[in-house]
Image (cartoon, rainbow, N blue to C red):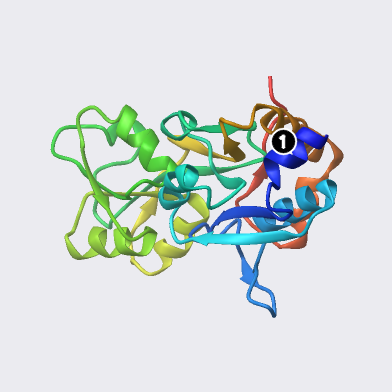
């Protein structure tokens, strides 16, 4: 445990990188300005287990958080686990997951997920979101319009430029659809964003400890309890690691 503590809290504080752009995992702010939600609650629990205070390090976008692994700005990062990020970040298995799917505008001839990846189809997506990284690997025929600035900016581009498809997390799409009459959310999912906890690959003992913590947190009901406590819809506890 001494090695784990040295790797995860070398400054005596657990610095937790938090993606403020994920409205399912960060749902509010405390009186002191700290983020609240499932993700900050997980970080606070880890800090409590280590016997140190938690310090939240906020990032507007997950890609920014991932990039900062080389800067020693955080000790743990709570973001989607994607292969591109795993080159430098040792991730746990997912502790929760979120469905990602597509929304199409009124009058669209697209009725299923299988009809999206075709020549001439333009898909708006928030650049470097976890589901964007999946699309980048898997879309072969359609054109990805990757918009910087998060989901709000991508949505504006989709609407203003009259693109064919908007990719996003289902809970957010439910709200977006209400603002665009006649739009439809396609059934099913093209992926599920796996929300995990990572640390630098330079911290192997800490990575193993975090993996065990996450499995215990899922099995004990801790994650489910945080989802219920913060009243989050569209978030589910991830299955146990294989």
Residue at (63, 56) in percent of width and height: 233
Find the residue positioned furthest to the top.
242
Give how far across and how far down residue 39 sits, in percent.
65, 54
Residue at (68, 53) in percent of width and height: 11
- Closest to the observer: 207 or 109? 207
Residue 212 falls in image quadrant: top right
Quadrant of the frame with the C terminus: top right
Q: Secondary structure at mark 1?
A: helix
Q: Left or right: where does residue 48 sit relative to residue 41?
A: right
- Closest to the observer: 51 or 92? 51
Q: Left or right: where does residue 144 sit relative to residue 232?
A: left
- Closest to the observer: 144 or 9? 9
Q: Left or right: where does residue 2 sit relative to residue 18?
A: right
237 over 241 or under it: above or below: below
Quadrant of the frame with the N terminus: top right
Residue at (72, 59) in percent of width and height: 54
57 over 83 or under it: above or below: below
Give how far across and how far down residue 74 sits, in percent.
57, 50
CA neighbours of label 1 inside 10 A, class few (<14), some (14 to 19), many (20+): many
Give how far across and how far down residue 72 sits, in percent.
53, 47
Give how far across and how far down residue 193 sits, in percent.
52, 40
175 over 15 or under it: above or below: below
145 over 174 or under it: above or below: above
Residue at (49, 50) in percent of width and height: 170
What residue is disc 1 on?
A: 210
């Amino acid at each position: 445990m001494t090695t784990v503590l040295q790797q995860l809290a070398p400054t005596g504080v657990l610095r937790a990188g938090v993606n403020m752009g994920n409205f399912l995992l960060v749902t509010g702010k405390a009186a002191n300005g700290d983020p609240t939600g499932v993700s900050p609650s997980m970080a606070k629990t880890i800090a409590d287990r280590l016997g140190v205070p938690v310090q939240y390090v906020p990032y507007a976008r997950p890609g920014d958080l991932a990039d900062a692994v080389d800067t020693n700005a955080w000790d743990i990062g709570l973001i989607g686990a994607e292969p591109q990020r795993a080159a430098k970040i040792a991730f746990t298995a997912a502790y929760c997951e979120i469905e990602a799917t597509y929304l199409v505008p009124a009058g669209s001839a697209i009725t299923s997920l299988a009809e999206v990846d075709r020549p001439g189809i333009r898909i708006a997506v928030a650049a470097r979101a976890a589901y964007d990284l999946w699309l980048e690997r898997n879309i072969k025929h359609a054109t990805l319009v990757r918009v910087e600035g998060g989901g709000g900016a991508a949505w504006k581009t989709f609407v203003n430029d009259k693109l064919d498809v908007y990719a996003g997390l289902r809970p957010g799409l439910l709200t977006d659809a209400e603002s665009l009459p006649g739009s439809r959310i396609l059934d099913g999912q093209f992926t599920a964003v796996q929300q995990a906890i990572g640390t630098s690959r330079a911290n192997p003992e800490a990575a193993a400890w975090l993996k065990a913590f996450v499995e215990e947190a899922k099995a004990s009901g801790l994650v489910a309890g945080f989802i219920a406590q913060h009243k989050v819809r569209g978030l589910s506890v991830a299955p146990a690691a294989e």
